[in-house]
Image: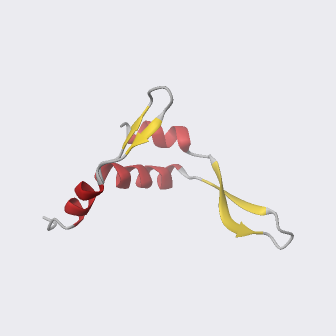
Amino acid sequence: MDVDKLARELAGLCYQTDYRFQNGQPFSERLSEGDVRGLLRALRDRGYTVSRDEPPHVESPLLSDIEEREHEPTR
């Protein structure tokens, strides 16, 4: 997964937050390239991969692999 390239592609996307304006309209945020890059790196470090196969999808590691990695001592 090319984190930098994918971060540039996803930067600027709008997503709906859990917040609402007083009139009830949903509040949206834009993703910054730095935030996307950090999120993608964190996912990659946990074993997730993003595929551009048709249709594009995210492949996740086994939960046991994630838990094992989180309990490894840091070096």
Q: Quadrant of the N terminus?
A: top left
Q: How many marks?
A: 0
**Horizontal and vertical percent for residue 37?**
44, 49
**Horizontal and vertical percent for residue 9?**
53, 37
Colour convention of the picture: secondary structure
Residue 18's place in the image compared with 51, above or below, is below
**Horizontal and vertical percent for residue 20?**
75, 68
Tell me which corner region of the image, top left, top right, bottom left or bottom right, holds residue 63. Answer: bottom left
Tell me which corner region of the image, top left, top right, bottom left or bottom right, holds residue 50. Answer: top left
Q: Residue at x 24, y 64 (%)?
A: 70
- On the picture, is 27 further left or further right than 38? right
| Residue nearer the viewer, 4 or 14 | 14
**Horizontal and vertical percent for residue 65?**
23, 55
Residue 7's place in the image compared with 19, above or below, is above
Residue 63's place in the image compared with 11, above or below, is below
| Residue nearer the viewer, 64 or 71 | 64
Residue 36's place in the image compared with 20, above or below, is above
- On the picture, is 35 further left or further right than 48? right
Residue at the limit of the structure toward the right, as seen here:
23
| Residue nearer the viewer, 11 or 42 | 42
Residue at the limit of the structure toward the bottom, as seen here:
22
- On the picture, is 16 further left or further right than 20? left
Q: Residue at x 54, y 42 (%)?
A: 10
Q: Quadrant of the C terminus?
A: bottom left
Q: Residue at x 81, y 63 (%)?
A: 25
